Amino acid sequence: MKTEALPAVHFGKEICNDLTAAEAREWLVTNGLGGFASGTVAGSFTRRYHGLLVAALQPPVSRMLLVGALDEVVKYKGQEFQLGTHHWASGVVAPEGNALIQEFHLDGTTAVWTYALGEALLEKRIWMKQGENTTYAQYILKGGSEAADLELKALVNYRDFHSVTHGGDWRMKIEPVAHGVRVTAYEGATPFYMRCLGADCDPLHIWYRDCAFPLERERGLEDHEDQLLAANFRAQLETDVSLTVVLSTSETTSLDGDAARTARTAQNKAILSAWAGTTEKAAEDPDWIRQLVLAADQFLVSRPLPEEPNGNSVIAGYHWFGDWG
């Protein structure tokens, strides 16, 4: 019997359920503007640079953390599953959603987790839209004998990605819009949107205090901050029907997650096709070479200049550096 080959980057339960091992492995997806989403395989955020939407407001620089996390809570057959993994300044890790991860892999430039919900599975995918400060988080229930209830708690911020936030009495403006909310951190700040077709959304304003970043402590830097619970999305997941949350600085970006996923796949295929045209032996190369090609492309960014409006550059390194082109 022929065994289907695993993706070039793949980790099973033995890694994902071990918090230390899972946090030693980080994922990164980018948008060609200097913006990115990043975290650990465990689903936790161990650096101040981790988050679901780090937007380049003046591409490829002025990078701001806008959305820190989506904390997922799933109710299936009377049982509740908390998928998030969080460190707190007290030293506590709660919840410990990494214990539910069956596998993690990269599908091109998309990060993919599979969680166990009893006999059912929940697949989560995170990717970014090329050329836009937009992150997609997609959820698909697989193998379920009935629907599941999904709750998503959206934690937001508005800070330079090198900094940390202490909320104090800071009051952001959280406004309902079609299918979600618009967040304006303060007058003059760039607004951003969190929306989801097929979900109910309740605007909130609750500070989560003392979220901890263990790797910042190791670096001798300030290691905790506050993040704002700005919205709660609620939806019912039917088997094999996708639900996608869209996090974006664009008011007009598409909320069609399946179409966005198709576009991201087509982008990856175009990159690999261009690379294959440069070498006669491309077809003989192993899959990990293709994964490296896609990874390298994520460091290429648009860098328009007055004398070169279509200019490009290279990010010197994520997470810290800008471009050195």
Image (cartoon, rainbow, N blue to C red):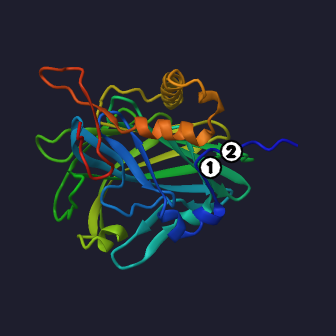
Q: Is residue 173 left or right of residue 90?
A: left
Spatial separation of the CA atoms under disc 2 and disc 1: 6 Å
Confirm whether residue 132 shows in the render: yes
Confirm whether residue 136 shows in the render: no
Compared to 157, does 300 lie above or below?
A: above
Q: Is residue 233 left or right of residue 190?
A: right
Q: Give the label on residue 89, or none.
A: none
Type of residue at label 1?
A: Leu
Residue 294 coordinates in the image, percent (x, y)? 48, 36
Residue at the far right in the pictured view: 1
Type of residue at label 2?
A: Lys
In what element is the residue under mark 2?
strand
Residue 82 coordinates in the image, percent (x, y)? 54, 62
In what element is the residue under mark 1?
strand
Identify the residue position indicated by label 1 in the image: 122
Identify the residue position indicated by label 2 in the image: 142
Question: Could you say which is closer to the camera, residue 104 or residue 101?
Answer: 104
